[in-house]
């Protein structure tokens, strides 16, 4: 870039002549015609660059812009001088470079990635190249952006109808302004101000049948109505049966009736990631702490825990591990970092809230940033901090992504007056890295909650904003979120799998961070001791301790779940193998039945005040369980979702469907213990795991073997056949038959009901016809064997059957006598089995066959 009216521009114009056109174009052509030229990098973190062209020395400085493809480098020309005749060759500290597509402009319009430029400068000075983790992370960022661009191009979906739902400003409910002028919940009338500045709502887009719906839930999309302004939104629901895509966004009055829904991605976020990596590689002083965390965790420093008084939060009881974590967070200064691992139920959020309250009480002028990978975690922390006297909090987010309970704290405009006095900012990692509200601030402390779910490239940009850093998480729980783009990158570049599956928290914790800079919370306040004992031994090397309140937990029921930890083994159950649906989705129909039976029994026999949830390891299994349970009525709400959606939540009772059942012992991602740890630890009082123990133990003996053994040890192991067998009724089993010789005098043996059917080939009594066609014993004429036929019912008023051999309705014809006229038709309720009894005392009817005549019954 050659600025207008600069000394360099005047030199180029004088060199090429003003009458020969734009001097910049001639300069670009000259650079492009060269096979290569020499680049000399000066010393320092911000090196000057000298380009040695034929007859010219061009002095430049790198332009730090990070919004561009990685192969571009932008330089601003400071001066252009004729090359001295005695110019010497430079060996060390120089590179030979070829410019493929030179572009010389007058303004700062060229996009660049300064990472490669700074890497080139370090190489030119003879220093070692960047750490491999930086290069791998940069390759991951490039792959993710390429995948996002491809997805935006291939998943563009048209819509031909839209239903607009506005959010009421009074009760926060959704209502359709085209049907009601008043809110159906609170009666508030829709005014002109509401139409001009509508609150965030929902838009239901109708998709034509000719187009496939490929957009996924929670995807960021650009709504492009025809002849109307475009706007951003987030997909909240996809209904393939109704062909509806529901989007949360600003419900403008001019939403349009036709247009396109295009997946969108945050270009500014990828630029922020590249810029952060460039600053680490370049040795920027502001990124020195990040370089320590990423490259050399052993050099991280944390202070000693500061002494403090009682808890600020009323009703909280502290323990030594929490006291130490809070004390370190309160005493932290610039350039320091600490990692806090919080197993399930140990109070990670409580530590964050208490530490912020103490810091604000001691230093009211500080500014703190709290961020996480998900909006739910951010809103949860803000809701618990709301009402703190010294806290002036703001929630930086779009309106459609904020929970209504904390919507009053939301800011979206950087001119909002609340930002002047705000001292605690809440945002997701992506928003914190891109919003000008946060990027323009200098924070004294950045707290990253649920750090185990943030990849390296997601965590670094937001951590860069703080002078001190706190990572709170648990790498024994769910790892960073993966999607189809991640899987494709791993297939193309297997060497990136490690940084994709590893969070920054786990890399630091396992990478040698000093004991002074790490804290492990050990006292759990959630699970029944039988549940926590398995969790502690399977995932935390028996470090967990039970708080006094969980020791008082009692069992929720006696039968058939008498303890807190159960394993329902479906091995050998008919139809118990897994199935693959469309797209390879996994489900297990037998486990759906077992889970439905478990839910029914728990709902009938447990106090309705206790909550109940069903967790399935696969999304398709979740859909089938929902359909199965939707046909039943329960006394309580039953929540059904995947294990990923349940992290951070807890329920009194949890039923877990593990799904996998096959002969080869393949269990997929169930081999990773994190998911089972999260699923079981969601339960407070009772957990029931449903799965094929043989398949699970063949896939991962250590983890699932411990589960089966723990259930057996406490008496919670049972077979699914036993559970389903007791589902048909609660009657006791019949007693065994007592033989007559042991029954005792005056005691009749138990009688067993049998079908009274004469066996084939039995000998008939004298004077009767055998049923199998053999000769009669008294020399009578042999009779053909009779077959049993089910009598067809004849509706009233129908004609009698035709006579057989001249006899209507005779016994030989096998038909009943004709019904007298006027007599109502009598319908038999039961089909009789065995011979009919003859008329006699106490029998009010005739059999219709005289046994003395030798007729068969």
Image (tube, rainbow, N blue to C red):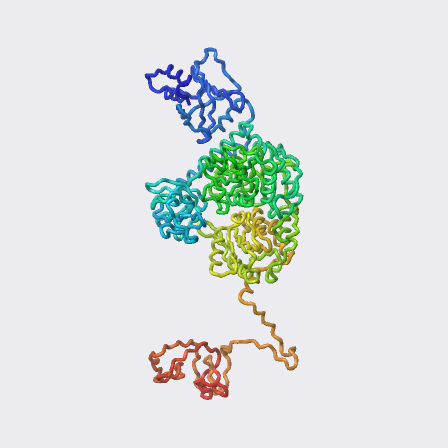
Apparent side of residue 373 relative to residue 163 in the rendered image (left or right): right
The residue under the point 53% across, 24% down is: 45
Residue 22 placement: quadrant: top left
Locate residue 487, reporting x and y percent: 48, 42
Task: Compare residues 623 and 719 and report the one nearer the observer.
Answer: 623
Q: Looking at the picture, tell me which residue is in the foreground, 731 or 525.
A: 525
Where residue 819 appears, as percent x and y from the top left, is 37, 83
Q: Is residue 661 visible?
A: no
Residue 366 coordinates in the image, percent (x, y): 57, 35
Which residue, as the protein is rendered here, is positioned at the far top?
85
Image height of 569 relative to 545, above or below: below
Q: How many marks?
A: 0
Task: Please state which of residues 160 and 149 is positioned toward the viewer in this rendering.
Answer: 160
Relative to 768, is 348 above or below? above
Please say if 123 is above or below 541: above
Residue 115, position as x, y percentages in the image = 49, 29
Q: Quadrant of residue 156?
A: top left
Residue 711 visible somewhere in the drawing = yes
Quadrant that contains the N terminus: top left
418 lies left or right of 353:
left
């Amino acid at each position: 870039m050659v600025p207008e009216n600069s000394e360099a521009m005047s030199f180029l114009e004088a060199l090429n002549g003003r009458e020969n056109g734009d001097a910049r174009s001639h300069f670009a052509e000259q650079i492009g015609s060269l096979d290569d030229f020499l680049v000399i990098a000066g010393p320092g973190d911000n090196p000057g660059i000298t380009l040695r062209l034929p007859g010219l020395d061009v002095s430049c400085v790198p332009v730090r812009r990070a919004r561009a493809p990685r192969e571009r480098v932008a330089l601003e020309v400071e001066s252009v001088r004729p090359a001295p005749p005695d110019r010497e060759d430079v060996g060390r500290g120089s590179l030979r470079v070829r410019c493929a597509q030179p572009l010389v402009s007058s303004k700062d319009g060229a996009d660049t990635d300064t990472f490669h430029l700074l890497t080139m400068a370090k190489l030119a000075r003879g220093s070692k190249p960047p750490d491999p983790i930086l290069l791998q992370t940069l390759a991951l960022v490039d792959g993710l952006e390429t995948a996002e661009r491809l997805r935006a191009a291939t998943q563009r979906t048209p819509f031909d109808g839209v239903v607009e739902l506005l959010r009421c400003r009074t009760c926060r409910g959704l209502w359709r302004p085209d049907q009601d002028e008043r809110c159906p919940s609170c009666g508030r009338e829709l005014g002109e101000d509401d139409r001009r500045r509508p609150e965030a709502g929902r838009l239901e887009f109708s998709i034509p049948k000719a187009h496939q719906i490929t957009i996924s839930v929670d995807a960021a999309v650009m709504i492009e109505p025809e002849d109307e302004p475009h706007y951003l939104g987030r997909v909240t629901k996809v209904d393939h049966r109704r062909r509806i895509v529901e989007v949360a966004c600003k419900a403008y009055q001019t939403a349009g009736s036709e247009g396109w829904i295009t997946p969108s991605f945050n270009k500014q976020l990828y630029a922020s990631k590249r810029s952060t990596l460039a600053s680490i590689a370049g040795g920027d002083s502001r990124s020195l702490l990040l370089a320590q965390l990423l490259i050399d965790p052993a050099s991280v420093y944390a202070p000693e825990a500061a002494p403090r008084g009682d808890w600020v939060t009323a009703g909280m009881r502290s323990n030594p591990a929490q006291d130490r974590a809070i004390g370190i967070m309160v005493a932290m200064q610039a350039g320091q970092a600490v990692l806090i691992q919080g197993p399930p139920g140990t109070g990670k959020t409580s530590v964050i809230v208490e530490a912020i309250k103490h810091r604000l009480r001691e230093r009211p002028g500080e500014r703190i940033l709290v961020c996480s990978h998900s909006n739910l975690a951010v809103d949860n922390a803000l809701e618990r901090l709301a009402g703190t006297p010294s806290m002036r909090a703001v929630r930086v987010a779009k309106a459609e992504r904020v929970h209504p309970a904390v919507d009053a704290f939301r800011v979206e405009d950087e001119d909002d007056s609340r930002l002047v006095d705000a001292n605690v900012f809440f945002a997701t990692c992506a928003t914190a890295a891109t919003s000008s509200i946060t990027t323009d601030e200098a924070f004294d402390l950045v707290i990253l909650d649920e750090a185990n779910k943030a990849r390296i490239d997601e965590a670094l940009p937001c951590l860069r904003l703080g002078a001190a850093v706190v990572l709170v998480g648990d790498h024994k729980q769910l790892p960073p979120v993966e999607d189809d783009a991640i899987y494709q990158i791993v297939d193309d570049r297997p060497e990136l799998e490690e940084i994709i599956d590893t969070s920054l928290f786990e890399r630091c914790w396992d990478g040698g961070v000093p004991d002074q800079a790490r804290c492990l919370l050990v006292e759990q306040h959630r699970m029944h001791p039988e549940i926590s004992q398995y969790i502690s031994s399977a995932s935390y090397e028996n470090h967990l301790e039970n708080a006094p309140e969980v020791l008082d937990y009692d069992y929720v029921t006696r039968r058939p779940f008498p303890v807190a930890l159960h394993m329902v083994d479906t091995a050998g159950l008919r139809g118990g193998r897994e199935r693959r649906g469309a797209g390879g989705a996994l489900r297990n129909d037998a486990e759906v039945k077992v889970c439905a039976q478990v839910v029914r029994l728990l709902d009938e026999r447990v106090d309705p005040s206790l909550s109940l949830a069903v967790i399935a390891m696969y999304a398709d299994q979740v859909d089938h369980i929902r359909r199965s349970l939707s046909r039943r009525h329960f006394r309580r709400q039953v929540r059904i979702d995947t294990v990923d959606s349940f992290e951070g939540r807890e329920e009194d009772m949890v039923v877990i469907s593990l799904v996998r059942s096959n002969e080869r012992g393949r269990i997929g991602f169930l081999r990773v213990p994190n998911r089972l740890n999260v699923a079981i630890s969601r339960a407070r009082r009772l957990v029931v795991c449903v799965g094929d123990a043989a398949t699970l133990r063949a896939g991962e003996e250590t983890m699932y073997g411990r589960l089966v053994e723990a259930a057996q040890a406490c008496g919670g192991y049972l077979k699914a056949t036993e559970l389903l067998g007791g589902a048909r009724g609660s009657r006791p089993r019949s007693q065994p038959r007592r033989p007559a010789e042991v029954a005792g005098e005056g005691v009749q043996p138990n009688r067993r009901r049998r079908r009274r059917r004469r066996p084939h080939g039995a000998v008939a009594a004298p004077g009767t016809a055998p049923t199998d066609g053999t000769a009669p014993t008294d020399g009578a004429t042999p009779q053909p064997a009779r077959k049993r036929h089910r009598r067809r019912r004849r509706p009233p008023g129908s004609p009698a059957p035709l006579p057989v051999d001249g006899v209507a309705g005779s016994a030989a014809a096998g038909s009943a006598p004709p019904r007298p006229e006027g007599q109502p038709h009598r319908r038999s309720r039961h089909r009789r089995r065995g011979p009919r009894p003859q008329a006699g005392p106490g029998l009010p009817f005739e059999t219709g066959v005289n046994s003395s005549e030798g007729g068969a019954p």
